[in-house]
Image (spheres, grey):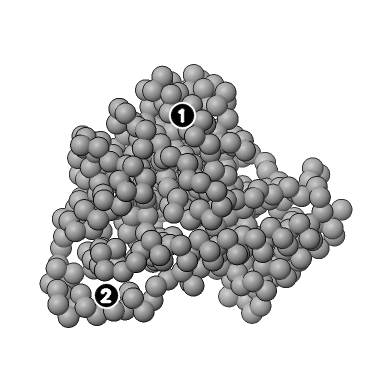
Amino acid sequence: MEYKISNKFVSMKPSAIREIFKSLGKPGCISFAAGNPSPESFPIPQIKEIADDILANDPITALQYGVTEGYAPLRDLVKQRLKRVYNIGTPDDETIIVTGGQQGIELTCKVMCNEGDVVISENPSFIGALNSFRSLGAKLVGVPLKDDGMDIAALENALKSNPKTKLIYTIPSFQNPAGITSTLENRKAVYELARKYDVLIIEDNPYGDLRFVGEDVPTYKSFDTDGRVVYCGSFSKILSAGIRVGTLTANKELVSKIVVAKQVEDVHTNVFFQMVCAKYMSEYDLEGHIEKIRKLYMHKAGLMIAALEKYMPADVKFTRPDGGIFLWCSLPEGYSLDEFVKRCSDKNVFVVPGTAFLPDESEVTRSFRLNYSMPSDEEIDRGIKLLADVVEEMR
């Protein structure tokens, strides 16, 4: 049979990161390509205790269908924490549970965008969100990132030039892939432009709890006065990525439509893992656990930055994140990123080419993403040395 793929999917490409994962089974390989939290961050004994307790004392709730909005005790706990930690939540807002933060992003686009509508994102940006927008027929427009966040002049120009813009998508804290955190002044400027041009902001904050240097910056949602921000959170980086439990907070009117879209998509998020999250939040020390993760990532980020400073030539530039799990490197002019990535893989070291994160897939870049949460301390030092060797070999 000849399959006639829909116009929305015919040009879709698989995630470059997921494709790289297929090559990581080689003995002795060093991967800086993952977006995974460190296995050291998983509270495995506590999750086992919780799972045993749920299956012993409340198995029917865990194994039966649930409501689309999410397990009520977890929703209440999430609302309380969002208000306490981030000052998020007004009487006009509602919080629901979604299947990973990415589903919240995708459902918001599905509800808000018609085919051909425009989504403005940071350039570079999270490949999972970009592919969600593409799959729904949205047109992507990228706005360059500066050290303080989105380029405000370029953002306004994009809004002026694209009257069909429905959404601005941003990861303002420890951005994936760049590791940059936007300033409060930058966030307020973006918000005012969203008001001026009447568009919605999706604030994706999966790394917000992972600050290990400096002070937190207020979220967009914390100063949202007119229901313009959809806030997406996640348990992936603070509890477990595999449980696929995320959160979405937005104006009640919009959330009611997102709930309908979720009913169509997957009925509800896994109830058992929602219960695990709720019990961990109510019976264990989540904030203490997060503090341990911060210390772990501060150590690993410090090792990677020290190795880059030690081995890399001065004309290789890189970001210095204050949190999260990524940093962004840029090769000097005249280098071929494809050749660099190939030579690295020949040495059994894997990075993600920056082309995977570009809203415009035809754009050329010399940048690549490095992850420091997954490799061991020894692998970080040895792997960065090997990357530096490739840079020198290509001169």
- Give residue 16's quadrant in the image: bottom right
- Give residue 219's quadrant in the image: top left
Q: Quadrant of the N terminus?
A: bottom left
- CA–CA distance in space, label 1 to label 2: 41 Å
Hey, what amino acid is under mark 1? Lys
| Residue 170 position within the rendered picture, expressed as x and y whole percent measured from the top left | 47, 39
Q: Which residue is drawn at 27% across and 41% down?
A: 89
Q: Name the residue under label 1.
A: 188
Depth order, front residue of 16/298: 298
Hey, what amino acid is under mark 2? Ile
Instruction: Please say if 395 is above or below 111.
Output: below
Q: For mark 2, does the 10 Å Cα neighbourhood hold few (<14), some (14 to 19), or many (20 or more) residues?
A: many
Q: Are marks 1 and 2 in contact (CB under 8 Å)?
A: no
| Residue 39 position within the rendered picture, expressed as x and y whole percent measured from the top left | 48, 72
Q: Which residue is drawn at 64% across and 50% down?
A: 320
| Residue 339 position within the rendered picture, expressed as x and y whole percent measured from the top left | 75, 55
Dot 1: element: helix
Depth order, front residue of 84/309: 84
Q: For mark 1, does the 10 Å Cα neighbourhood hold few (<14), some (14 to 19), or many (20 or more) residues?
A: some
Q: Is residue 249 left or right of residue 6?
A: left
Residue 196 in view here? yes
Depth order, front residue of 384/296: 296
Q: Which residue is drawn at 52% across and 31% down?
A: 186
Query: Mark on residue 50?
Result: 2
Q: Which of marks 1 and 2 is nearer the N terminus?
A: 2
Q: Which residue is drawn at 50% across and 53% down?
A: 211
Instruction: Please say if 69 is above or below 30.
Output: above
Q: Is residue 75 left or right of residue 352?
A: left
